[in-house]
């Protein structure tokens, strides 16, 4: 059986519930329901609540402004700007949509991919779309490598020909050809 997923608020209310020595029967009888003391706990089913009392739960991390989140419907990743009044919606800094409704925290890999996508997008390119004249540097040193040839499978940097995956793994962009001031536009 899958663990019950609860929020930090559920956990706070559960602590109060246990501190007051309430039992499962108190939940069935509705103890504290009118006062709203256990408002979030009463949103659970009796089975879910029983599992909570048996420590069979997982606390979902809370979302806050600045968190990177993943949209479960579209697969997009964005930074969260704000939560909706009902906590069901996350307003995001995405260039396609304003908010996500079904989301989770993004993984480190998803965050890295999104940062990479945004970096290239700022320069009017798809991720790792390189052009002749772009300047790269290896991640291990600062020696500049100029892109001299680009084809579907390989990229030539100075006189060194590498696969696209090798370039992506070993290099980072120092300057795009369009932004270079050391070459003329002729």
Image (cartoon, rainbow, N blue to C red):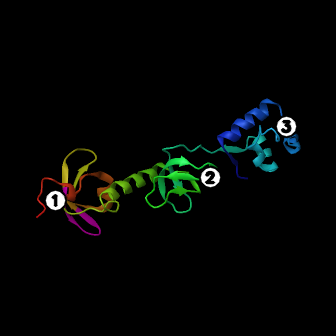
Whole-percent x and y of residue 27? 84, 42
For disc 2, the marked residue is 88
Q: Secondary structure at mark 2?
A: loop
**Which residue is rendered at x = 70% and y = 36% of the image?**
12
Relative to 55, is 101 on the left or the right? left
For disc 1, the marked residue is 159
Q: Are marks 2 and 3 in contact (CB under 8 Å)?
A: no
Determine the CA span between mark 1 and mark 2. Answer: 54 Å
Q: Is residue 37 above or below residue 119?
A: above
Q: Secondary structure at mark 3?
A: loop
Label 3 crowd bin: few (<14), some (14–19), many (20+), radius 10 Å? few
Q: Which quarter of the image is occupied by the C terminus? A: bottom left
The residue lying furthest to the front in this view is 85
Q: Magenta region: which residues?
A: 146-155
Q: Residue 64 shows which numbered tag? A: none
Is residue 185 visible in the rendered structure shown here? yes
Q: Secondary structure at mark 1?
A: loop
* Mark 1 or 2, closer to the camera: 2
Q: In this figure, what is the number of numbered marks?
A: 3
For disc 3, the marked residue is 23
**Which residue is rendered at x = 39% and y = 52% of the image?**
115
Dividing the picture into quadrants, the one containing residue 140 is: top left
Whole-percent x and y of residue 1? 73, 53
**Which residue is rendered at x = 82% and y = 48% of the image?**
46
Indicate whether residue 152 is drawn in magenta: yes
Q: Nearer the viewer, residue 83 or 27?
A: 83
Q: Are marks 3 and 1 in contact (CB under 8 Å)?
A: no
Whole-percent x and y of residue 30? 86, 42
């Amino acid at each position: 059986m899958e663990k019950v997923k609860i929020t930090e608020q559920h956990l706070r209310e559960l602590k109060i519930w246990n501190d007051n020595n309430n039992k499962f029967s108190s939940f069935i009888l509705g103890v504290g329901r009118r006062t709203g003391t256990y408002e979030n706990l009463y949103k659970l089913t009796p089975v879910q609540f029983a599992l909570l009392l048996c420590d069979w739960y997982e606390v979902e991390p809370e979302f806050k402004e600045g968190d990177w989140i993943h949209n479960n419907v579209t697969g997009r990743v964005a930074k969260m700007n704000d939560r909706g009044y009902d906590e069901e919606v996350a307003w995001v800094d995405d260039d396609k949509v304003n908010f996500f409704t079904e989301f989770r925290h993004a993984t480190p890999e998803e965050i890295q991919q999104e940062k990479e996508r945004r970096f290239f997008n700022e320069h009017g390119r798809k991720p790792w779309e390189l052009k002749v004249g772009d300047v790269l540097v290896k991640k291990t040193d600062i020696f500049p490598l100029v892109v001299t040839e680009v084809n579907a499978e390989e990229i030539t940097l100075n006189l060194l020909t590498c696969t696209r995956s090798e370039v992506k793994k070993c290099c980072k962009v120092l300057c795009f050809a369009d932004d270079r001031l050391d070459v003329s536009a002729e």
